[in-house]
């Protein structure tokens, strides 16, 4: 019998339980459905297509890529090839879960077999003793650690006997290049473990250093499974390994939160913040544009936004700084910033992004207290102590030496914008807005 392995966000062959399940069939066809409504043009899609090309190469050119809506395409492939089952790794995003339900219906008697998920522990598994989901990260992490995860699945491209789909009607050939793909992911992971893990805990907040793993986009596309990484860390309990494990757990926590509360992709997790007054008029729109373009006149904010525009990635500390600036200095809805991030980030992930934003905005799970407003100048001085990160991304400031780039004063070059707002005044405004919703609680 023949099965279909439908790849989505699991673009790899190692540690892929779906392949173990499909390997029980005599042969299988590897399928990817390119849905243009989801894969909109942009850096994330470019990166994704590079990952897809790399997967096709690993499979010896036997990946069947078709364009269209999976609800039509997957049943069509099953019928035309006479397949008896479709294997996937479970998708927990609100969109993915709904789409899979629709595909399952359209398949009729042919089973859609879900094996594994993009997480070490599938969303919904970890619950409090009373059966309800966790709302706070610390206790979730302890339960997650106690629960543990399976060892990696022993799979590779030979686990399944792939059929050659070259003659299939409507086949699209994807020939894209990015630094995506499983091999590139493993190479970066190796260099992180060998050269950076020991200093990860100490240096992970420094955007001027290449001190973090850069695994996020690979995890998003499933070029690597988090279990592979956790297995490699094994029982290492030094500060680097412990911190890294904990960061991976944030990804799992936010996926769990979004699974239980899909509405929080768009509205505040903490309901009282839905009444927080925001600015949305013409002045707000123009401030938003300055923020998007990296022209706020605050060097660390502008460096971050320009890194995002150039690389499709931004350092975590700087994500927090620019998000704080958008919500608390510009008083814009966090959703504006979150949408821009989703458009631009190659690791853009609905759960981590929307909840990362809400954490900063103060309206999410275990939110940083709303009244803690990041000061972009002191944050820059603390985390980019020599100013190298700012000079790398803001060419106008390349002539300003050392840490002076964060506090420009008379050194502000003529071609670099004046601050679009006064941080001290906007901080007080933010606190007033906060007080206005506190009073009605
Ligand atoms: P490392 O420090 O090496 O961390 C290892 C892995 O742990 C990451 O790859 C990621 O999978 C996970 N991780 C680390 N921090 C977090 C976190 N705070 N929340 C969830 N997972 C985490 N991460 C995304 O993957 N996609 C997003 O769309 C995203 N949007 C964000 C938006 C905001 C406003 C903020 C503050 C954070 C966001 N993050 C997002 C989390 C974090 O910034 C990135 O995961 C991290 O910068 C990726 O770089 P890295 O792989 O080198 O991280």
Image: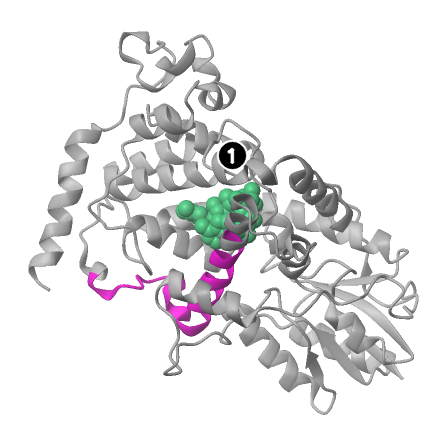
Q: Which residue is mark 1?
A: 309
Q: Residue at x 51, y 69 (%)?
A: 146
Q: Nearer the viewer, residue 132 or 57?
A: 132
Instruction: Using residue 366 as the reference point, say whether residue 236 is left or right of it.
Output: right
- The quadrant in which residue 298 appears is top left
Magenta stretch, overall SS: helix
Q: Residue at x 44, y 32 (%)?
A: 304
Q: Residue at x 58, y 80 (%)?
A: 101
Residue extending farthest to the left is: 439
Q: Position of residue 212 (x, y in %)?
A: 56, 39
Query: Does residue 373 show up magenta in the picture?
Result: no
- Which secondary structure, mark 1? helix
In the rendered image, the vertical position of residue 50 relative to residue 367, given as above or below: above
Quick one: quadrant of the C terminus? bottom left
Instruction: Using residue 20 as the reference point, say whether residue 204 is left or right of it.
Output: left
Q: Nearer the viewer, residue 273 or 315?
A: 315
């Amino acid at each position: 019998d023949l099965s279909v392995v439908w790849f989505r966000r699991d673009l790899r062959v190692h540690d892929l339980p779906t392949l173990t399940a499909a390997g029980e069939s005599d042969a299988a066809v590897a399928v990817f459905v390119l849905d243009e409504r989801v894969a909109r043009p942009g850096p994330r899609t470019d990166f994704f297509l590079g990952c897809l090309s790399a997967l096709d190469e690993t499979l010896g050119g036997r990946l069947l890529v078709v364009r269209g809506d999976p609800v039509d395409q997957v049943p069509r492939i099953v019928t035309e090839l006479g397949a008896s089952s479709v294997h996937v790794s479970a998708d927990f995003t609100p969109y993915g879960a709904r789409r899979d339900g629709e595909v399952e219906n359209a398949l009729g008697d042919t089973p859609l077999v879900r094996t594994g998920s993009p997480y070490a522990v599938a969303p919904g598994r970890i619950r409090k003793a009373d059966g309800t989901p966790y709302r706070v990260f610390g206790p979730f992490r302890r339960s997650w650690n106690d629960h543990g995860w399976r060892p990696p699945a022993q799979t590779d491209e030979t686990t399944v006997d792939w059929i050659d789909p070259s003659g299939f009607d409507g086949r699209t050939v994807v020939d894209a290049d990015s630094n995506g793909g499983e091999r590139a992911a493993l190479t970066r992971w190796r260099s992180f473990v060998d050269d950076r893990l020991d200093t990860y805990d100490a240096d992970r907040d420094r955007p001027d250093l290449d001190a973090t793993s850069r695994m996020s986009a690979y995890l998003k596309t499933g070029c690597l499974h988090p279990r592979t990484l956790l297995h490699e860390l094994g029982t290492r309990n030094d500060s680097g390994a412990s911190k890294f494990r904990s960061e991976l757990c944030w990804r799992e926590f936010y996926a769990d939160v979004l699974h239980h509360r899909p509405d929080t992709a768009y509205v505040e997790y903490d309901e009282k913040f839905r009444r927080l007054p925001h600015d949305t008029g013409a002045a707000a729109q123009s401030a938003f544009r300055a923020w998007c373009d990296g022209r706020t006149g605050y060097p660390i904010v502008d460096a971050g936004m320009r890194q995002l525009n150039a690389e499709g990635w931004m350092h975590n500390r700087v994500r927090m700084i620019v998000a704080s600036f958008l919500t608390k200095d510009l008083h814009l809805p966090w959703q504006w910033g979150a949408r821009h991030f989703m458009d631009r980030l190659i690791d853009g992930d609905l759960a981590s992004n929307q909840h990362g934003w809400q954490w900063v905005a103060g309206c999410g799970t275990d939110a940083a207290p709303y009244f803690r407003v990041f000061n972009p100048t002191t944050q820059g001085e603390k985390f980019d102590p020599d100013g190298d990160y700012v000079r790398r991304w803001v060419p106008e400031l390349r002539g300003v030496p050392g840490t002076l780039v964060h506090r420009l004063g008379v050194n502000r070059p003529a071609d670099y914008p004046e601050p679009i707002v006064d941080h001290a005044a906007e901080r007080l405004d933010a606190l007033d807005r906060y007080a206005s919703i506190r009073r009605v609680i």
